[in-house]
Image: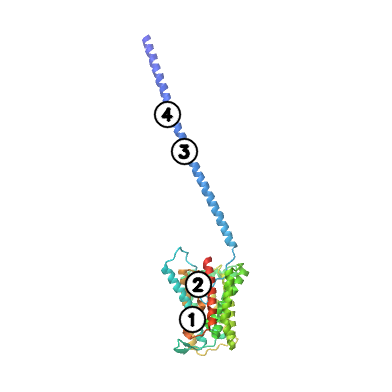
Amino acid sequence: MAIDEGASMVQQGDRSEHTLEAAQSAEKALQAVTQDLQRLHQGLVTQLSDEVAQLQAEKARLTAEILQLRANHHALQAQPLPPASPPTANPIPFEAPAAPLPLPKQKSEPPSQFRLGFLLVLLSTMALSFHNVVVRVIGSQSTVLGLFDTGGFIKLGFGNSLLILWLRMLVVLPLMVPVAMVLYPKVWKDIKNFLTASDRKPLFSVVGSGAFLFLSQILIYIAIGQIGPGVAVTILFMYPIITVPLAWLLFRDRPTVLRWAVMGMILLGILFTAYPRIQSTAAMSGTGVFAAIAAGTAFAFYLIFMQLGFRKLHPIPVSLIQFSTIFLLSSVLLVLPFEFGVRVQQTQGFVLGGIVLGVLTLVGYLANNFGVRYMGAARASIVASSGPVVTALLAFLIIHDPLQSVQVLGILLVTGGVTALSFERMKKT
């Protein structure tokens, strides 16, 4: 019995030692697990802290960008409307604004694309300059290229100029409708929304621009008939002398030093160009100069009104409204029971001349439209500012319209001034 009790006590002691060792092992394992968990927790806390710091920094950056965008937005809203820009070609209803909105600006343009745009705008300028020469031929018998005599179908007074403009619109307007639908499919929707809008001021602006363009066209036709296309178109390009002060008055766009210099250059060029005609013994020469000055003044108001209307409407619908306004005004005046001196000496030649004018107008429109797409409106206006020079050159080559040296200097001064304005516009753009 004693032996059995001793053995039992020994066994119990062994079990106690094994139990103690197991407990100690479990405690060490628990401590190791606890340490691992603490290290994992510390790592997660550190990682989360870094991510929170990054998110806070990103939030601060985005907040600063949003504030800057808001500031830019308010600055753009407070910025006055820029002055009316020079037309991209000779004075007809689809000058620079009639071209579709430029394509998204690219960092670089392929040279072939730029050359194509340059050639198209140059073609537009030549077509519209040739248009002015044809007007001269219609109103005065001329020797074309020194080969044959033609022209003199009507005398370019007010009534006959009105008749030419009506015939030209009669040819152009039906052709312009499908062209406009191809170039800008939403043209009719925009016109409908524009005409039914509660705010009538934009509509009055566009119709007013068409009315001033109508008056400018009538007056420039009279001037071309009396002093020739080169001199008349050069004087017409005096419009910056009026648009720059008007933009300052209406849009708070203070003229820069360059604009003041350009105005002086253009004024001097007009004096050089017009003075030989004014001192001429022919009374019609002086009348033609003043008609050209009046045409330039009306054209300046056309640009100002057009600038107001373009806030609400795409340029192509504006062109259609202006064409329609000119056609309606000329139609109404022609049917009124007033004597405007409408006399046609050769009906066949007059009708043919009107068709040629309409075709030249459409060619000028399309070439200008696509040229602006390829090279941009700002650079296209630089090419088109050569209108006075191209008109004078074509008039000299085709019908031998003479110019004195001082008039050539005046034409170059006016062209240089308008080109400088176009360069400034391109720089701002």
Q: Earlier in the sequence, mark 2 or mark 4?
A: 4
Look at label 2 and name its amino acid.
Ile
Q: Disc 2 marks which residue? A: 382
Q: How crowded is mark 2: few (under 14 residues within 10 Å), some or many (20 or more)?
A: many
**For marks 4 and 1 on the same chain, the one whose residue lies earlier in the sequence:** 4
Task: Left or right? Give the position of 54 relative to 242.
Answer: left
* Residue 283 image point, x, y percent: 59, 88
Residue visible at 43% across and 71% down in the picture = 115
Residue 178 visible at all: no
Q: Which of 179 and 58 is in front in this view?
A: 58
Sequence-wise first label, 2 or 3: 3
User: How far apart are labels 1 and 2 at the CA level?
Assistant: 18 Å
What kind of residue is marked 4?
A: Ala
Label 4 crowd bin: few (<14), some (14–19), many (20+), radius 10 Å: few
Separation of residues labelled 4 and 1 (CA atoms): 103 Å
Q: Is mark 2 on a helix, strand or loop?
A: helix
Q: Name the residue under label 3.
A: 43
The figure's colour scheme reads rainbow
Residue 309 bears which disc, if any?
none
Residue 224 shows up from this direction: yes
Q: Quadrant of residue 31?
A: top left
User: Which percent across, then down, holds residue 200?
Assistant: 60, 70
The dot on residue 29 is 4
Question: Which is in the foreground here, disc 4 or disc 1?
Answer: 1
Name the residue carrying label 1.
393
- Relative vertical location of residue 137 with respect to residue 68 in this rendering, above or below: below
Q: Which amino acid does label 3 sit on?
A: Gly
